[in-house]
Amino acid sequence: FLNVIFAVTFQGLTNWCLQILRNRRHWDQCPAILLGATREAEVVRDYIATLRPHGIEIAAHLPLDPAEPWSALAARIESAAAAHGARLLICADKRLDIPQIMQILELSERLGLSAKILSDKMNVLPNQARIPVDLIMETPLVHFETASFSARRELITHVWSALVAGFFL
C-alpha cells in the first residue's frame, strides 16, 4: 500500500518539476507540426496543448486537403519545419490513403523529423505486428522515428547508462 502512495507522489512530483523546467527553461521541448483539419486533429491538438506529453508542443497547425497537389503540401511542410525548428510531424487526417501516407513518411525522413500518423488504414501494425500505438478516437496513432534521431538517441542513452553504471559500481 505504501508503495502505491510513494509511486504516485513521486510521479506527481516528477511531472511538476518537468513542467517547471519546460515552462521556464524550455527544457525537453519538442516542437511539432500538426497536419489535418478534422475532428481528430482538433482532439490531438487539444490533448497536446493540455498535457504536453514528452514536451511536445504544436508549433504550427497546417490544414490538409487530400486533393491538394503533393508538391504544394510538401513545400508548406518544409517551410513550417524550417520556420519553427520542428522535430516532429503529426498527421491527424484519416482521409489520406496509403500512398499519401508513404509520401509524408518519406518527406519526414528527408527533413529529419519523427512522424506520428493517425490512420485506420494502418490497423495491421497494432493488430498483427503488435506494435504499441496510441489510440485517438479508436484510431491508431503510429509513431515512426527517423534513423538519424534514433542513432543519436541510442548513443546518448548508451553513454548515460555507462556513466550511471560506473557511478554505482
Image: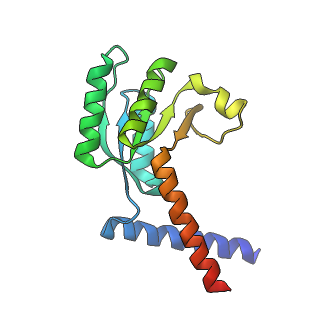
Residue 97 appears anywhere in the view: no
Q: Residue at x 38, y 58 (%)?
A: 29
Q: Position of residue 72 (x, y in %)?
A: 26, 22
Q: Is residue 7 above or below residue 120?
A: below
The number of numbered discs placed on residues in the rendered structure image is: 0
Residue 119 appears anywhere in the view: yes
Q: Is residue 30 left or right of residue 157?
A: left
Q: Quadrant of the C terminus?
A: bottom right
Residue farthest toward the right in the current orientation of the protein: 1
Between residue 79 and residue 163, name the one nearer to us: 163
Q: Is residue 68 above or below residue 40?
A: above
Q: Quadrant of residue 121?
A: top right
Q: Residue at x 51, y 53 (%)?
A: 151
Q: Position of residue 56 (x, y in %)?
A: 41, 52
Q: Is residue 152 above or below residue 6?
A: above
Q: Position of residue 75 (x, y in %)?
A: 26, 29
Q: Is residue 46 left or right of residue 81?
A: right
Q: Is residue 102 left or right of residue 111?
A: right
Q: Residue at x 46, y 49 (%)?
A: 148
Residue farthest toward the top in the current orientation of the protein: 67
Q: Quadrant of residue 44?
A: top left
Q: Quadrant of the N terminus?
A: bottom right
Q: Residue at x 26, y 39 (%)?
A: 80
Between residue 20 and residue 153, name the one nearer to us: 153
